[in-house]
Image (tube, rainbow, N blue to C red):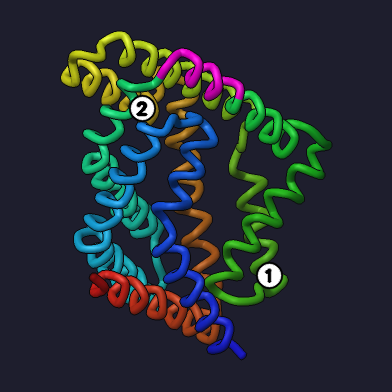
Amino acid sequence: MTSVVMLGACSAVKIGYNNVPDLAYWWLDGYADFNETQSSRVRDELLRLHQWHRATELPKAAELLQKTRELVPKEVSPEQVCSLFADLRSRLEAVHARAEPGIVAVAMSLTPAQLSHMEAKFGKSNSAWRSDWLEGTPEEKLAKRMKSAVERAEQVYGTLEETQLAIVRASIARSGFDPQLSYAERLRRQQDLLQTLRQITTSRESSTLATSALRGYLDRSLNSPNTAYRAYSGKALLDNCRATALLHNSTSVAQRERAAQRLAAYERDFRELAAQP
């Protein structure tokens, strides 16, 4: 049964990856409402980015999965987990660097009406976020976070035991999650993005200025000017590393074998996808 489930998951990974350009386009279009010329440009940029990612980044992602898989049979430290997170972040930064010229070109073509459409879309998504994380009793919000954390863990290790569920619950209780602070940062980033895009659209003749503005926005997203949020975000990362290590170190031999098999299957998928033309 486990092998059947993993084969299904692997098939889903391949189908999902091959459809990334279309999925990314429809997600972006939901925010920007592209016109015909922009749509053609965005689709072309996404296809080029996808081809580059398949040839260049998928092998590196497979190497990261291999590195993670080799740690699975062992006890791990929070520092090792944080190192893996840092490796993942570097891969995401590489994708952004590659996509930057295309992002700048499309951003320079946006109209005031499209930016208003984006702002309205932010409003709708914020309503859903508030419903998920700001509304309800503390117990209900804790239960929602618990459900999400357990589902993620069980995708890797299989069914968690009661002692492991207790570890997850205790880690969540200690995490100091602050939805109000997170929501305030979410709003800040959205307004920062809109202001940056407005700045870019007023400098249509200068891709250099537009690129500088975009990089400034990205830096403020990664390193918030809100010192309270920056401290909170750093602590949250460390808490996540500790919680991940603590849960992993509680797993059985069978659970670790399952995790290793799943990671190996994803690694194999990535290498096969990278080999496709």
Does residue 106 appear anywhere in the picture? yes
Asked whether 114 falls inside the magenta stretch, the response is yes
Instruction: Find disc 2 in the rendering and name its residue.
Output: 223
Determine the main secondary structure of the stretch shown in magenta.
Answer: helix
- Rendered-image quadrant of the C terminus: bottom left
Instruction: Find disc 1 in the rendering and name its residue.
Output: 163
Q: Position of residue 106 (x, y in %)?
A: 32, 29
User: Splitting the image into 4 quarters, where does residue 175 fall?
Assistant: top right
Mark toward the start of the polypeptide (1 vs 2) = 1
Residues rendered magenta in the picture:
111-120
Q: Position of residue 251 (x, y in %)?
A: 55, 75
Amino acid on which the number 1 mark rests in the picture: Thr
Q: Residue at x 54, y 79 (%)?
A: 8
Which is more foreground, mark 1 or mark 2?
2
Q: Position of residue 254 (x, y in %)?
A: 54, 86
Distance of label 1 from label 2 (alpha carbons): 36 Å
| In-front residue for pair 34/230 | 34
Secondary structure at badge 2 equals loop
In the displayed structure, does residue 190 sit left or right of residue 213?
right
Q: Residue at x 42, y 13 (%)?
A: 195
Q: Quick one: label 1, few (<14), some, or many (20+) residues within 10 Å?
A: few
Q: Is residue 259 above or below residue 99?
A: below
Q: Is residue 251 above or below residue 16?
A: below
In the displayed structure, does residue 261 sit left or right of residue 126?
left
| In-front residue for pair 100/184 | 100
